[in-house]
Amino acid sequence: MGNSYQPVDSALINKGNTNANRLGLYHFTTQTNQVKETNSPVDIGYHYVAVDANGIPIDSNGDGIPDYFQDANGNGLVDAGETNWGLAILTQPVSQVVPQGTNVTFTVTAGGIAPLSYQWYFNGTNAVGGAIGATLTLTNVQSGQAGTYSVVVTNLMGSLTSSNAALTVLVPPVIMTNPVSQTMNSKVA
């Protein structure tokens, strides 16, 4: 197996214990033909899957697929061709149709390795000032605010952009000219 694996006579075998993540063993298999060590819970030759306090495999981005399935080579990094297992948008913002003058809230639900940061955008490229949370609230909306809203969610594993949520603002009709009274003569035969 080459010198990328620890030899069976290594000075590190049976030398205590630690948590697997402290050794960089995220979802890691080293060598499959080695005997389990006597004194260590982290052993060469066994596959380690990171689990929570209940023994459930960790799903950092909350998408329902454990990290060890998504981190194909087990290196703890999101590599080319892998799904970003460290970040996911779980619930997209939803389009809304509202009357002018009302308040609107767009919400995104994201999961992943903390900390998560957010930036909302109007029509794809215009950052909405101060909109850096999982919700965006617009008060007293006007027709100029109609368009699409999206959010970029970022953490140390990368960034993801939500789908666009359209805001349609209904403007009440305006009477431009008042009706004019008219009198009609009718002849009865």
Image (cartoon, grey):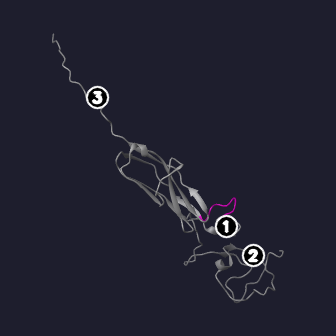
Question: In the displayed structure, would residue 179 be above or below residue 56?
Answer: above
Mark toward the start of the polypeptide (3 vs 1)? 1
- The residue under label 2 is 30
Packing grade of label 2 (10 A; few <14, some 14-19, many >=20) is some
Q: Identify the main secondary structure in magenta.
A: loop
Compare marks 2 and 1 and give the one earlier in the sequence. Answer: 2
Front residue (pair 143, 14): 143
Marks 2 & 1, CB-CB < 8 Å contact: no
| Residue 189 image-quadrant placement | top left
Q: What element carries label 3?
A: loop
Name the residue furthest top. 189
Q: Nearer the viewer, mark 3 or mark 1?
A: 3
Identify the mark at residue 177; answer none if there is no mark: 3
Relative to 56, say whether 41 is above or below. Answer: below
Instruction: Pick the residue in front: 171 or 70.
Output: 171
The residue carrying mark 1 is 77
User: Disc 3 versus disc 2: distance between alpha carbons?
Assistant: 82 Å
Q: Residue at x 23, y 24 (%)?
A: 180
Q: For residue 25: magenta?
A: no
Query: Is 105 rendered above or below residue 179?
Result: below
Q: Is residue 94 left or right of residue 15?
A: left
* Residue 104 point in image, percent of width and height: 39, 52
Q: Which amino acid type is marked by label 1?
A: Leu
